[in-house]
Amino acid sequence: MPEERETGIPRQGTQGRPAAGSSTPPPAALPAGEGRAAALPARWRDVVAHLHPVFQPIVQMRTARVHGHEALLRGWEAAGFASLAALFQAAADEGALPALETHIQAAAVAAFLAAGGTAEVRLFLNIHPLAQGQVPPPPQGEQVHLVYETTGTGPIPTRAGRDGGDRRGRVDIAFDRFGVGVADFQRLLASPPSYVKIDRAFISGVDGDQAKRALLGQLIGSAHALGLATIAVGVETSREFYVCRDLGCDHAQGFLLGRPGGGLLAEASEIAESLTRSDRRRPSDARQRLFELIERIAPLPLEAPKAKLLEYFGNLAAPPVVPVVDRAGVPRGLIRERHLKPFVYSRYGTEILRNRAFGNTLKDFVIPCPVCDIGTPLERVIELFAEAADSDGVIIVEGGEYVGFLSSQSLVRLLHEHRLATAVDQNPLTRLPGNNAITAQVEALVADGERDHVLVYLDFDNFKPFNDYFGFRQGDRAILMFSEQLKVQASALGGFAGHIGGDDFFLSCSGLTADRMRERLVAFLGRFRSDAESLYDVETRERGWFEAKDREGRVRRYPLLRVSAVMVQLVAGAPRPGLETLVELIAVHKTAAKAAPDNLFLVAG
């Protein structure tokens, strides 16, 4: 294990160890078996007597099952080192690093099995970059599904690969600290892993940082487009958990879900189960629609013989592709029927497929395929399919395990339905979502009590006199100018923009404080007021007003166009008003917003 990359911020007095007063004894020290001890100098045999592994759970976000455990090292203080980095640096300087890593890996596997670990739960192991390629498989490695974590560009650990390992054991690769290196995506293409562990720099505070939220969504989407599972590292709050889950992240690791410790390993996370139960938000419509559209194509196991393909595609009713899963039910990609044609139509092709001397597993035919969780928003599923060149469809998983295949034909149908539903509710002038979408957005935010939200109603001041005096075409130009600027603002905030009708608009944003949202809105309204001056002739612009008739037919002076806004703040954890109450709050305070110096009125929801 290299220098520890602890998930989460250590709490004072704990430093990531089991809680004080815990009845669980610490794991046993590293064993110094006869065959391995000889490779270590005498002083390092004394060092390993003080070291012991602890385990931190990695939890599947939608099912709350423990997907795996990362082995972390403890005891370096007792061994006389100031830090874990100092321990490994000393071992490297003295040429003892590969032997030390061999001891550590063997101890981690032995402790994992002793604590109730099974081959159905992954054991994540770190190997120091300088020792990669020099550490033999642990003696009991065949009994464990190993996942080697790597951050460098060194050789892949022994027996590891994206095909799930060899006959003696299951071995995968995880790219650690994904997203912080400029070469991360080059590494993904050159040597695809099975997992990417997204660095905690993208997780910490993601619920209150829209830019970070957008970046995290892109990282998750990029990994899924390549068929890779994602792990959010450093999840410490329920809000971070919900954001990561809603963005489609598969697994999470952090102090919220479990600190590193010893004792028997849990099969499920009580915290994750509690968070799922307490989530009062309405279940996604995407889940039901995906269940209706996915094809339950029976997958083939990765270790199946190649001749199985002849039998499978020999059935005239077989689909043109077949998903392939490993022994844990995790999808590894798919196989296209057309890729078998060179074998089927060649003279000795079928004999080659049946000949074990040429390799007898399906991995040579497996190609990557985008993967989506069953709860992924429909818009993201469509985007993922569009981003993947030459894709046959999308593999759908639940809890990381294969449940079905969404073919390209089904995706086209889904895209058509999505566009039709959007067009029906869309405002014909601005192309912004209309009342149905706005109502659904407000209901979703009211139900989401875990984060702060701000709802904004925006209304033009004196738009009717402007429209009557300058004509409807100039009125439409004003509406279009504002709507385009509102779209940009919503995109920058990671929020939602809608057009209620006429000169009434809606904007919502999550994760920003009311004060910060107010600053952004004041600047936004000021820019529009300045830009709207271009709609007037020079004389009117310099004068600052125009004359037009009011509703009673009397001639009055009206100022140049501006927009007023009523902000309704929804505070996390506080009681939420219903939709009708929100409408009433906005109506009551519209006049106050128009009279305010900055054309903005904030009301607590």
Image (cartoon, rainbow, N blue to C red):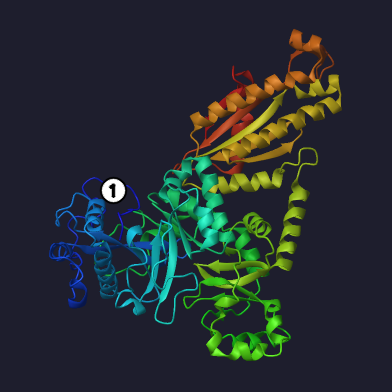
Q: Residue 409: x and y, percent? A: 74, 67
- From the viewer's perspective, is 112 left or right of 303? left
The quadrant where residue 130 appears: bottom left
Pick whichever, 435 or 430, lies toward us.
Answer: 430
Pick whichever, 393 or 333, lies toward us.
Answer: 333
Q: Residue 330: x and y, percent? A: 51, 72
- From the viewer's perspective, is 124 left or right of 445? left
Relative to 546, does residue 172 appear above or below in the rendering? below
Residue at point 61% right, 32% down? 586
In the structure shown, which secondary structural element does the residue marked by tag 1 occupy? loop
Q: Residues within 10 Å of mark 1 (few under 14, many from 20)?
A: few
Q: Residue 143: x and y, percent? A: 35, 79
Q: Which residue is mark 1?
A: 10
Relative to 593, does residue 174 appear above or below in the rendering? below
- From the viewer's perspective, is 310 left or right of 266? right
Q: Residue 449: x and y, percent? A: 48, 46
Relative to 4, does residue 289 appear above or below in the rendering? below
Residue at point 20% right, 67% down? 27
- From the viewer's perspective, is 37 left or right of 198? left
The amino acid marked with disc number 1 is: Pro
